[in-house]
Image: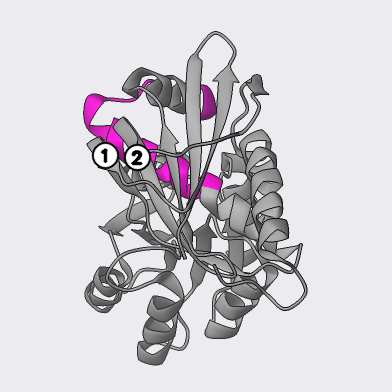
Amino acid sequence: MARVLITDDAAFMRMQLKNIFTSQGHEVVGEAENGQVAVEKYKELKPDLVSMDITMPEMNGVEAVKQIKSIDPGATIVMCSAMGQQQMVLEAIQAGAKDFIVKPFDEERIKQALSKIF
Amino acid sequence: MTTNQSLTANQVVKEFYNGLIHSVHTVIPVEHAVGSPSIIKSSVEIPFGVSIHFTGDLIGELVFKANVRLFSDLGEAMFGMALSEEMIDSFSGELGNMLAGSLSTHLSSKQINTNISHPVVQRSTLIPHAQRSILTPITFSSLGDMEIFLLVNA
């Protein structure tokens, strides 16, 4: 079981992700509505996994990945974004993300991503 | 409008339109029909909808206009659960984000590079006339109609 921090500016998507993570036996320990809040909550909660949207107000997801990795190089972060172009995926992976899930996704895709990590 | 070096402005708009149709097919698993596009020469009244700005090889705005009930029904069709009232705005914005993100991804395969803003839910908004405005109507079987506006100014 992993302790998860969900990052997405859409409350609907946070709810969807929370339902999926919880149904797979993981514990959602926090939610963040933008990258800046995710960085702060990462320091506070030290989760095993962070799910990270890209297009968000205040601080985007790629910048948040860079900041979290600078705080904790061992952080495990999976991107969940509607922006699936190759350049975006590369940028996120280069920043330190472990996987890139393109929205809309289903429960199976989340399960597949987690099975590669844990 | 800015364009990349190999495509004309009209070609970029054409790819945008084709990509938009592709994105609706990809993102929304509900049977639908795409109507003929038309040029709009006036401002656009949006009782309810979502807008997202594009930057990069095309600078403009996408606006998804539909009634609240259609957004709610699409949410239920896509995620298998009825949306509570407080989740409808959030889902509507996310639907716009998924459609615009899918479009941006599709365009990148045509060497057209774009980025998108986060979505803004619009209520009772008048969107000013743009230099070029293209309306594409989509009819979702048994659910209702959505109008998608591509507004290009720069």
Question: Which residue is more in the foreground, B127 or A20?
Answer: B127
Q: Quick one: label 1 or label 2, which is nearer the N terminus?
A: 2
Q: Where, by quadrant of the figure, is residue B121 drawn?
A: top left
Task: Specify few, some or many for label 1: CA neighbours under 10 Å numbering under 14, 14-19, or 20 or more.
Answer: few
Q: Which residues are magenta?
A: B77-99
Q: Amino acid at mark 2?
A: Ser
Q: Chain of mark 1?
A: B
The colour scheme used to paint the residues is one colour
The residue pinned by badge 2 equals: B43
Q: Say whether residue B82 is magenta.
A: yes
Q: Residue at x 61, y 67 (%)?
A: A99
Classify mark 1: helix, strand or loop: strand
Q: Is residue B79 among the parts visible in the rendering?
A: no
Quarter of the N terminus of chain A within the rendering: bottom left
Q: In this rendered view, identify the residue nearer to me: A98 or B77.
A: B77
Q: Is residue A72 magenta?
A: no
